């Protein structure tokens, strides 16, 4: 008993010390820095995306401080973890704004957590730029201080895919399509607009499934698509594992659609390739607001610095990082324009300007929905992602039909 | 290919994988009277070990089991020695708390070690499939099912054909009486828990080969595994197998003939009905003690 | 190690495990100070209540809770305490069935979710706007939870084996979650529902919610205390000890446990509604959330099952500890490990929960003292102090 108690105590203290060792307290720089509060998912279901978002925020802070900061003051991040829960998100933003009195705040990952953050920002009149909160219910909160920093809101995400299919020569155009989506506020609203457009273009829906986000086995859903023999597959997936589950069954059943697109997963760079197998990425489509090779504002610099800091290849950069970086860019432009970090002033500047970001130019509607922009389509080709649509910025031709699985 | 036929066949085969993940849970309950909430996390630890061997050292996951099973055996041994053995009264309730805490620590450490990226285990037999009456049956499922049968069979033999097994079964029936007739219950308990954890390594490898995963997958897994062993009857290995099959087949069939939306709902309805009719579970011993 | 030393070690490691990483991080926030004060106060409460000054202590506790937002007037401290108080109500209510009768339900989050959906749907359909009036609507959440508890209890309580009861209650919870996802016309499915918000300023916003949670907590604890000291409560505890024997001595076991089950649903429904109002938006997975049940059970076990103080203490310790650890160590990625280790240490050192351990130690000390006194007085005296003594 004694030994065991000692062992427990020893383990506890070792872990505590280790924890203390890894957390370096941030030393404040020079004269009162501008503090930006950031609550992101560093643990729990969204931690993969949350960490990538944090990378983007931190890179922007480094860059802005290299150029002398905002209004001559250094910028400092105050980062807290939201554990991927709404409850912790509420506590975090209340603490950041109400107690710590940070100057500005940036948004969390996912529409799910953006709404509580938006609620608190609204209560205090803070401007909230969200890198990943684009579901219709976020805009339905009608907060003028919110903006969704991606080129298109979630409902319009897949429309470009419909345009691209419509632009195919009539002889090649597919005739059947199968849809499957997770019952998630991010994915579910994306499918009906696309379905309406494809139906209008004469592409028949042969299967439409909604599956629970947490289901033990996606094999039957995948089998149903295989059975339908659809020429095009549209997956409303929230995560890499869901795409992996479908692909695994498609490969095993020797079923290759002519085109396959997923709402989320193929945008996760090397993580996607590791999970589904590098060879199986060929031909996969994903709507995206950013690619490493796009000729947008400061994009080249962003990619170089990212690779220098985190290593890997350009294709492996997760899409969350540039989205978060764009949040910083927009904030910098608003502050430069108004010469102020007063949130009420910033909110006024949010609506009448076109901002330049690594994701391209951006403009926001009254409640933060992006206006005028659209996603483009990215396709995995020979292990790299290429823009294939719209043609004005395309880097490679749309590979159609998709080659067989390896 | 007939869709219902296909989903039943694949449901049965993947049920075998779930059985292999769940059997450790039911075994440790039967012998130690503990509910091991860390089981879901141990599955993932097994999966991560197999993944690491395959990804960094290019060791085939099946061959890798020769490493991962002993590794998890040792981890199980350690957990039992450090955390479960000291529990005297109220073992079931306390074990839930203690193993939950152990699971959290493991989840945290795995997260720090491997990061949050989703990974999956690859091998040629994961993607390849054999054509049976128009349905392609993936080798990994056949392999998983076979492995489940072989390992569960081995445990069965261990239980019913060896002296250790006899002592173990005596312990299951009555801990106090077993002590009285001179059985070293402590040793039996530790070994059983270690064996149960070792088996979990195989379940973890198969889970990791058929699903992409990260350390956060733990809670989903443990709630499914608990459902399985209670539906099957706490402590019953056969029950765990049958309940796994019921879960996977019912979910799969409802998904294809009706809609995926209500597939898990159907399984919960089955569970409630079975429990009301047979509170001890399908193969549980009738007069279960109240805790 | 002597038991008393072990207890001391437990309390010290608890305090250390929370304080150390925080001080090193250099963030001395009001929330943390408030939390440490809270833990010490709670332990003191156990001590004095055991000394039979229950009424006085409860009174001081309530006054302290009322004064709290004035003393710790930071939104961080009030938010964290709001959640902690909400869980005091939830765990105390759960304790009426789970702790008193031993029927451990892992599906009470169903009532939480029912309450949350009730307030959201009523506000939406009637076009209500935010304000104090919505707290009255929150009561409807309790009514709905109680009504739904009737058929659920009718089915679940037929199961007398603990495992099957647990699993059926979990199954119920998941079924409600799926219904909330799938009945799109009524619940808006995966897109969730908004709850109208009051236009209170940020500095004031938490205060009404804090007092609503406090009121609910006080009433629920009062209800639990009243039940515990009533004939009805005696029947419930007889069921926990041995249901057959209880039936044998004339307790209508079915009526007892069924009533306890339905009663325990009501405050949780109200709590769910208040939570929904506070958080402004609900999704099926955030209110029909199995983590809520896990938190309830962990709080109750940590504090001490079946005692009145246990769930209160457990919630007051666990909720803030979890949130503060996430807030201050989460960025470094150590929150899970720290939380797990902290939990392990407490469980291994105080296996029956904090309250029973403290009570037991005190009782033993008192017995020893009695023995010593008796020895001093006469050789023949037999101490029987162990036989009496109130339960926490």
Image (spheres, helix red, strand yellow):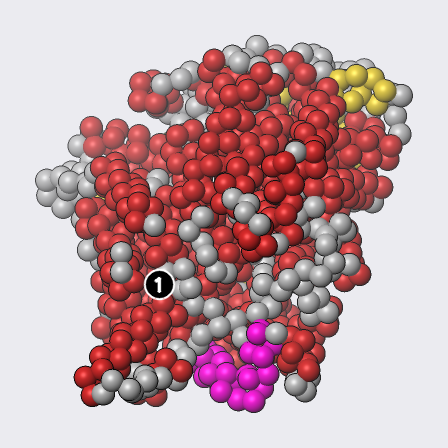
Observer-nearest of A141 and A183: A183
Name the residue: 27% across, 51% down: C17
Q: Within 10 Å of the Cα at label 1, are there few (<14), some (14-19), or many (20+) other Cα atoms?
A: many
Name the residue: 34% across, 22% down: A310
Point out the residue furthest to the left here: A30
- Picture coordinates of residue C118 (x, y %)? 61, 70
- The magenta segment: C215-241
Q: Which residue is mark 1?
A: C317
Q: Is residue C230 magenta?
A: yes
Name the residue: 43% across, 42% down: B81
Name the residue: 42% across, 47% down: B83
Q: Is residue C166 magenta?
A: no
Would you say the magenta stretch is mainly helix, strand or loop?
helix
Please tell me how many numbered marks the rendered image carries.
1
Observer-nearest of A337 and A84: A84
Observer-nearest of C273 and C248: C248
The chain to which mark 1 is attached is C
Image quadrant where one finds the C terminus of chain C: bottom left
Q: SS class of the residue under badge 1?
A: helix
Q: From the viewer's perspective, tell me whether residue C237 is left or right of residue C180.
A: left
Q: From the viewer's perspective, tell me whether residue C123 is left or right of residue B244.
A: left
Residue C253 visible at all = yes
């Amino acid at each position: 008993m004694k030994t065991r108690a000692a062992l427990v105590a020893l383990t506890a203290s070792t872990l505590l010390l280790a924890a203390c060792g890894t957390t370096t307290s941030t030393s404040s720089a020079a004269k009162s820095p501008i503090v930006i509060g950031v609550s992101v998912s560093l643990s729990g279901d969204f931690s993969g995306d949350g960490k990538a978002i944090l990378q983007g925020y931190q890179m922007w802070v480094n860059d802005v401080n290299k150029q002398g900061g905002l209004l001559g003051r250094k910028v400092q991040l105050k980062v807290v973890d939201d554990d991927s829960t709404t409850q912790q998100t509420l506590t975090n933003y209340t603490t950041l704004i109400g107690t710590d009195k940070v100057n500005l705040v940036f948004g969390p990952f996912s529409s799910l957590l953006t709404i509580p953050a938006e609620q608190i920002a609204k209560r205090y009149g803070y401007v909230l730029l969200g890198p990943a909160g684009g579901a219709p219910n976020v805009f339905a909160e009608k907060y003028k201080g919110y903006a969704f920093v991606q080129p298109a809101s979630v409902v319009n995400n897949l429309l470009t895919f419909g345009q691209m299919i419509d632009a195919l020569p009539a002889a090649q155009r597919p005739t059947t399509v199968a849809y499957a989506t997770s019952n998630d506020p991010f994915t579910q609203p994306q499918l009906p607009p696309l379905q309406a457009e494809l139906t209008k273009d004469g592409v028949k829906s042969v299967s439409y499934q909604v599956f629970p986000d947490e289901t033990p086995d996606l094999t039957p859903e995948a089998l149903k698509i295989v059975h339908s023999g659809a020429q095009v597959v549209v997956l409303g997936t929230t995560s890499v594992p869901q795409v992996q589950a479908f692909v695994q069954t498609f490969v095993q059943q020797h079923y290759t659609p002519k085109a396959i697109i997923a709402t989320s997963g193929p945008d996760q760079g090397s993580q996607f390739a590791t999970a589904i197998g590098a060879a199986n990425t060929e031909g996969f489509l994903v709507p995206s607001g950013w690619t490493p090779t796009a000729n947008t504002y400061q994009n080249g610099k962003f990619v170089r610095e990212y690779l220098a800091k985190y290593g890997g290849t350009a294709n492996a950069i997760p899409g969350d990082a540039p989205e978060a970086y764009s949040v910083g860019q927009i904030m910098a432009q608003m502050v430069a324009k108004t010469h102020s970090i007063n949130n009420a002033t910033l909110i006024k500047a949010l609506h009448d300007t076109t901002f330049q970001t690594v994701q391209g130019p951006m403009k926001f509607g009254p409640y933060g929905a992006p206006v005028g922009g659209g996603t483009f389509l990215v396709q995995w080709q020979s292990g790299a992602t290429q823009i294939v649509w719209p043609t004005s910025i395309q880097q490679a031709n749309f590979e159609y039909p998709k080659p067989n699985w390896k | 290919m007939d869709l219902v036929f296909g989903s039943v066949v694949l449901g049965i085969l993947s049920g075998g994988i779930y059985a292999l993940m769940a059997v450790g849970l039911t075994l440790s309950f039967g012998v130690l009277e503990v509910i091991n909430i860390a089981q879901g996390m141990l599955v993932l630890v097994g999966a991560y070990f197999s993944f690491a061997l395959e990804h960094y050292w290019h060791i085939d996951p099946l061959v890798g089991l020769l490493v991962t099973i002993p590794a998890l055996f040792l981890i199980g041994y350690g957990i039992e020695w450090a955390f479960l053995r000291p529990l005297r009264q109220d073992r079931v309730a306390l074990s839930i708390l203690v193993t939950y805490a152990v699971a959290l620590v493991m989840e945290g450490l795995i997260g720090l070690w491997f990061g949050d990226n989703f990974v999956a285990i690859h091998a040629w037999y994961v993607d390849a499939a054999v054509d049976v009456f128009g349905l392609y049956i993936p080798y990994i499922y056949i392999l998983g099912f076979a492995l489940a049968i072989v390992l569960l069979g081995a445990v069965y033999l261990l239980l019913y054909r060896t002296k250790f097994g006899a002592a173990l079964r005596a312990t299951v029936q009555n801990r106090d009486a077993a002590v009285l007739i001179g059985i070293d219950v402590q040793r039996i308990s530790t070994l059983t828990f270690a064996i149960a954890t070792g088996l979990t390594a195989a379940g973890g490898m198969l889970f990791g080969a058929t699903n992409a995963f990260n350390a956060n997958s733990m809670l989903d897994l443990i709630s499914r595994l608990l459902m399985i062993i209670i539906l099957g009857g706490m402590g019953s290995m056969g029950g765990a197998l049958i309940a796994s099959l019921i879960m996977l087949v019912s979910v799969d069939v409802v998904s294809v003939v009706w809609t995926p939306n209500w597939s898990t709902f159907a399984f919960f309805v089955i569970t409630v009905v079975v429990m009301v009719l047979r509170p001890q579970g399908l193969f549980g011993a009738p007069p279960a003690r109240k805790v | 190690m002597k038991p008393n030393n072990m207890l001391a070690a437990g309390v010290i490691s608890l305090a250390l495990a929370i304080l150390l990483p925080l001080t090193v991080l250099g963030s001395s926030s009001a929330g943390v100070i408030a939390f440490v004060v809270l833990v010490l106060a709670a332990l003191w409460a156990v001590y004095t209540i055991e000394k039979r000054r229950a009424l006085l202590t409860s009174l001081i506790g309530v006054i302290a809770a009322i004064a709290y937002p004035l003393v710790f007037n930071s939104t961080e401290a009030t938010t964290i305490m709001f959640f902690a108080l909400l869980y005091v109500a939830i765990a105390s209510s759960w304790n009426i069935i789970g702790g008193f009768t031993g029927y451990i339900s892992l599906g009470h989050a169903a009532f939480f979710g029912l309450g949350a959906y009730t307030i959201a749907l009523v506000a939406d359909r009637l076009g209500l706007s935010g304000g104090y009036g919505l707290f009255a609507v929150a009561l409807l959440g309790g009514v709905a939870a109680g009504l739904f508890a009737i058929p659920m209890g009718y089915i679940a309580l037929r199961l007398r084996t603990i495992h099957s009861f647990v699993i059926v209650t979990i199954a119920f919870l998941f079924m409600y979650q799926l219904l909330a996802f799938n009945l799109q016309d009524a619940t808006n499915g995966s897109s969730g529902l908004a709850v109208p918000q009051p236009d209170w300023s940020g500095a004031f916003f938490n205060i009404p919610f804090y007092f609503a949670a406090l009121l609910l907590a006080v009433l629920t604890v009062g209800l639990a205390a009243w039940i515990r000291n009533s004939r009805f409560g005696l029947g419930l505890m007889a069921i926990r000890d041995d249901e057959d024997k209880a039936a044998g001595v004339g307790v209508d076991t079915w009526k007892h446990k069924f009533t306890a089950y339905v009663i325990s649903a009501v405050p949780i429904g109200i709590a769910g509604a208040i939570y929904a109002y506070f958080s402004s938006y609900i999704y099926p997975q955030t209110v029909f959330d199995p983590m809520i049940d896990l938190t309830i059970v962990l709080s109750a076990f940590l504090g001490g099952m079946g005692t009145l103080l246990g769930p209160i203490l457990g919630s007051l310790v666990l909720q803030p500890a979890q949130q503060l650890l996430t807030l201050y160590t989460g960025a470094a990625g150590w929150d899970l490990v720290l939380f797990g280790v902290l939990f392990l240490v407490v469980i291994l050192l105080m296996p029956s929960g904090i309250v029973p351990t403290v009570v037991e130690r005190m009782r033993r000390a008192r017995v020893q003292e009695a023995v010593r006194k008796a020895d001093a007085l006469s050789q023949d005296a037999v101490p029987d102090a162990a036989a009496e003594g109130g339960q926490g």
